Image (tube, grey):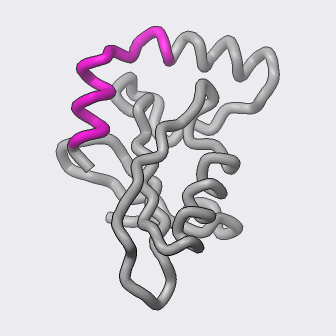
Amino acid sequence: MSTNMHDDQPGHWHTTTRGPDLYVASPAGRPAHGAVVVGHELFGVTPRVRRMCGRFAAAGWTAIAPDYYGRSGARRVGLGHDESGRTRGFGLMGGLTREGVGEDTRRP
């Protein structure tokens, strides 16, 4: 199931059955050179991360940003760059494990 939650962004969200939700941006009207995985920052898959995916897509690459925080039940998080966002982001980051992030990165 794919949904575009942010019409101003170049890609779309893709819900998987076995892994994290993925934000995916692909080149328009041409085959991709390949794919890159874009790991999100403390604040989640923010508009900035989605725009970065769009820049890769414009350069001919499919860009995939896994929602690593989804394992904690906080799906498709995009926190503000403020004290509240930092506090929540550090809380979510504390729930990540090296194994989980590795698995979610390899799975897409």
Which image quadrant: the N terminus? bottom left
Numbered circles on residues, count: 0
Q: Which contiguous range is marked in magenta?
A: 93-106
Hey, which quadrant is residue 73 in on the image?
A: top left
Q: Which one is nearer the viewer's eye here, 30 or 87?
A: 30
Q: Is residue 70 above or below residue 97?
A: below
User: In the figure, is residue 27 to the left or right of 46?
Assistant: left
Q: Is residue 66 magenta?
A: no
* Spot occupied by residue 26 in the image (x, y as percentages of width and height): 46, 71
User: In the figure, is residue 3 to the left or right of 87?
Assistant: left
> Could you tell me which residue is drawn at 38 percent across and 72 percent down?
33
* Spot occupied by residue 65 in the image (x, y as percentages of width and height): 45, 48
> Could you tell me which residue is drawn at 59 percent across and 73 percent down?
58
User: In the figure, is residue 10 to the left or right of 33?
Assistant: right
User: In the figure, is residue 75 to the left or right of 44?
Assistant: left
> Could you tell me which residue is drawn at 69 percent across and 47 percent down?
48
Q: Residue extending furthest right?
A: 82
> Could you tell me which residue is drawn at 50 percent across and 17 percent down?
92
* Spot occupied by residue 91 in the image (x, y as percentages of width and height): 55, 11
* Spot occupied by residue 94 in the image (x, y as percentages of width and height): 47, 9
Hey, which quadrant is residue 54 in on the image?
A: bottom right
**Majority SS type along the magenta span:** helix
Q: Is residue 82 above or below residue 46?
A: above
